[in-house]
Amino acid sequence: MAKSNSPHSPMRRRLLKMGAGAGLLSSVPVTSAFARQQTRARIVIIGAGAAGLAIASRLHNALSGATITLVGARQSHWYQPGLTLVASGLWSMDRVVTQTRDWVPADVRWIEADAAGFNPDNRQVSLTNNETLDYDLLVIATGCQLNYDEIDGMSAALIGQQGIGSVYAGPEAARATDNAIEGLIAQGEGRAIFTLAPTPIKCAGAPLKMTFTTLSRLEDTGIRERFDVDFFTPFRQRVFSVPVYNDFVLERWQAQQVGLYDERRLVAIDAAAKTALFRHASGATEQQSFDFIHVVPPMSAPDAVRHSELAWQDGAMAGEWLETDQYTLQHRRYPEIFGIGDVIGTPFGKTAASVKKQAPVLEENILSFLAGQPLQARYNGYTSCPLITSIGRAVLAEFGYGGELMPSFPFISPTEESWAVWVMKEKMLQPAYYAMLNGRV
């Protein structure tokens, strides 16, 4: 993958023009030109994160007469695509935190609780505040669950201590991860280990981004040779699901002297001793010492979903993820239930960019369902990851089902790293994300 796009290139000028128009794009609701569909349906949306807020806004704009209830306990909203920038020392924590209440549409009831259980045969959901909701249509948008406890000795409370980092657990964890990396740098030498979970994970590029930005920081010290950097993956010669990007990363790491330990799963951490235990595909275990370790926990749907009738009953995702048709986003056994975001059990689709593509598909199919019409809209698995390759450069990885490349911008190569994609990641995606929460893109 060749480097391109100097600060004075024609691409830069086009990119900045596109960014200047982003505010106009986000100022007009997409449904404003259409009559609102009449319904008396009771709609319950479980999850008040990016996916839940986006579909709540779209349904609020598209429907008249519906009772829409949004369920989610967390009062602060996290701009999760920015967590890697916080953990890399580039953003302050307050740049990724807003308040959930500021994104809840008018006339949508917000219940500050989480789902405790589902009774789909009776169209009911029970909440952690002991309330039970009846629904005519249910949207599951819970996001995924971080299962740190599946790593013996590990918990989210350890992030930031004893050289342990993990970008996934929220803004404070991201800041604590940055502090742990700073501690490694201040030490002047040592070993940094980066890991990958054996399960599907949200933002699959985040472990790679953290490796690349840490490498940049170590190279900036002028004493990179004093640090060992190693990456442990449970898969054979694989750190990313799309071959073209996987090959690029492995080749780049080889040039940057990153050790690759494949077919090894992190199973335990001894924080006090600064050791990690990995299990090889053969079943053998090996202990590795570290000065810094970035932990990627196994992930799943929240327990209330994965231990319910709504989870996949068979196949690779059985008992772990919400069962949905990968194209219509409708539950395959309960037609009045739909899914969106990280919780759904589809081959791809666990990024904010995926939600941006899923939300209009889901809106159209919900409107069709409520009108008794066939579901026509299709989600193609679109997933996007601005894959940071160093501080100041990135590749815009866009792909869908089957690993098919799906570039959005004709002037940005999907296989070239550039300054322009870095600018998009660092400056432009956040306004588009907030427009998505408002149902405007």
Image: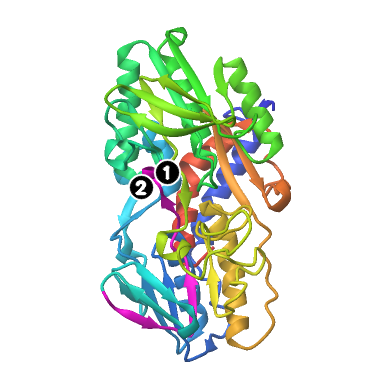
Please give left or right for residue 128 compared with residue 194 in the image.
Answer: left
Q: Could you tell me if the residues under marks 1 and 2 are in contact, i.e. CB atoms within 8 Å?
A: yes
Q: Residue at x 70, y 75 (%)?
A: 376
Q: Which residues are magenta?
A: 130-150
Q: How is the image coloured?
A: rainbow
**Left or right: 268 as drawn, with respect to 17:** left
Q: What type is the residue that disc 2 sits on?
A: Val
Q: Is residue 60 visible?
A: yes
Query: In x, y percent, where is residue 154?
Result: 34, 37
In terms of depth relative to the viewer, which is nearer, 47 or 357?
Answer: 47
The C terminus: image quadrant:
bottom right
The correct choice, above or below, for 376 with respect to 93 in the image is below
Q: Where on the picture, by quarter, is residue 159? A: top left
Q: Any mark on residue 82, and which?
A: 1
Kindly identify the amino acid type of the residue bearing the numbered disc 1.
Gly
Where is residue 235? Give x, y as percent. Answer: 61, 34
Provide the residue designation for mark 2.
96
**Residue neighbourhood size for the residue with mark 2, other residues' Cα within 10 Å, grouped as few (<14), some (14–19), many (≥20):** many
> Residue 82: where, in percent of width, then height?
42, 43
Depth order, front residue of 291/149 = 149
For the residues marked 1 and 2, what is the alpha-carbon distance in whole angstroms?
6 Å
In the figure, 361 relative to 258: above or below?
below
Query: Is disc 1 placed on a helix, strand or loop?
Result: helix
Q: Between 96 and 116, which is closer to the camera in this rendering?
A: 116
In screen coordinates, is 76 left or right of 340? left
| Nearer to me, 424 or 127 | 127
**The N terminus lies in quadrant:** top right
Residue 361 lies, in percent from the top left, at: 62, 68
Badge 1: how crowded within 10 Å, few (<14), some, or many (20+)?
A: many
